[in-house]
């Protein structure tokens, strides 16, 4: 094998290995690292969903009275009795007038006095009553996660439990202009 072919194969292998090492990189200045999780605590929030409960209650009776016009018995008996009583009062033509007044009065009194001509109906009154009952429940809102990176502990609230490790995007860039801040100048400054 020639040295040129050997060099080309070696360069290709180095490039492939370099690409595999950079597979965790997102951008040129960002990479993904794993940080161990120290603690993960679920966080709950209380949500109230009121529940409505209704029932029917009997509160009293509603009474209705109806006059039955088809029962003239009391009026007839009252008219006869009133006419007889009226005819005993007075003399001559006064007796006829007294009998007529007695019959009319007896008819009215007999009609009112007749209990069969009146219908009374009682019904229980139903009322719907409702109350609201609190119905609290716990809802998972996330996890308070403590993790360690570069010897320091950090906290974050996540919507999921990360497990034993947390993936972090780490970005390395120059923090500020460092000229004149006491840094030693290198050869190329």
Image (spheres, grey):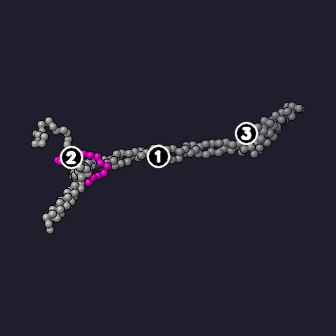
The answer to whether residue 21 is magenta is no
Please give the label number shown on residue 52: 1
Q: Earlier in the sequence, mark 3 or mark 1?
A: 1
Please say whether residue 37 is visible from this viewpoint. no
Q: Identify the residue at image location x=45%, y=44%.
A: 132
Would you say 21 lies left or right of 77 here?
A: left
Which quarter of the rendering shows the C terminus? top left
- Residue 162, relative to residue 179: is it above or below? below
The region drawn magenta spans 147-163
Label 1 environment density (alpha carbons within 10 Å; few <14, some 14–19, many ≥20): few
Image coordinates for residue 54, horizontal then vertical, percent: 49, 46
The quarter of the displayed image where residue 67 is located? top right
Image coordinates for residue 168, horizontal then vertical, percent: 24, 50
Q: Which residue is mark 2?
A: 172
Mark 1 and mark 2 residues within 8 Å of each other at the beta carbon: no
Q: Nearer the viewer, residue 46 or 134?
A: 46
Q: Secondary structure at mark 1?
A: strand
Q: Earlier in the sequence, mark 1 or mark 2?
A: 1
Q: Secondary structure at mark 2?
A: loop
Please give the label number shown on residue 112: 3
Q: Nearer the viewer, residue 36 or 129?
A: 36
Would you say 52 lies left or right of 87 here?
A: left
Q: Earlier in the sequence, mark 2 or mark 3?
A: 3
In space, the residues marked 2 and 3 are separated at their CA atoms by 108 Å
Would you say 189 lies left or right of 120 here?
A: left
Label 3 environment density (alpha carbons within 10 Å; few <14, some 14–19, many ≥20): some
In space, the residues marked 3 and 1 are separated at their CA atoms by 51 Å
The quarter of the displayed image where residue 117 is located? top right
In space, the residues marked 1 and 2 are separated at their CA atoms by 58 Å
């Amino acid at each position: 094998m020639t040295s040129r072919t050997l060099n080309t194969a070696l360069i290709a292998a180095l490039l492939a290995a370099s690409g595999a090492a950079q597979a965790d990189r997102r951008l040129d200045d960002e990479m993904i690292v794993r940080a161990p999780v120290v603690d993960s605590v679920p966080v709950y929030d209380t949500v109230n969903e009121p529940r409505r409960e209704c029932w029917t209650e009997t509160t009293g009776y509603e009474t209705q009275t109806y006059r039955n016009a088809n029962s003239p018995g009391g009026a007839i008996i009252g008219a006869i009795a009133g006419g007889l009583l009226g005819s005993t009062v007075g003399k001559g033509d006064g007796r006829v007038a007294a009998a007529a007044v007695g019959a009319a009065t007896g008819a009215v009194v007999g009609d009112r006095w007749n209990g069969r001509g009146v219908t009374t109906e009682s019904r229980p009154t139903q009322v719907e009553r409702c109350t609201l009952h609190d119905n609290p429940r716990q809802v998972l809102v996330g996890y308070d996660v403590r993790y360690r990176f570069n010897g320091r502990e950090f906290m974050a609230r996540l919507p999921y439990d990360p497990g034993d490790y947390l993936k972090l995007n780490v970005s390395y860039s120059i923090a500020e202009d460092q000229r004149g801040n006491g840094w030693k100048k290198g050869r190329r400054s």
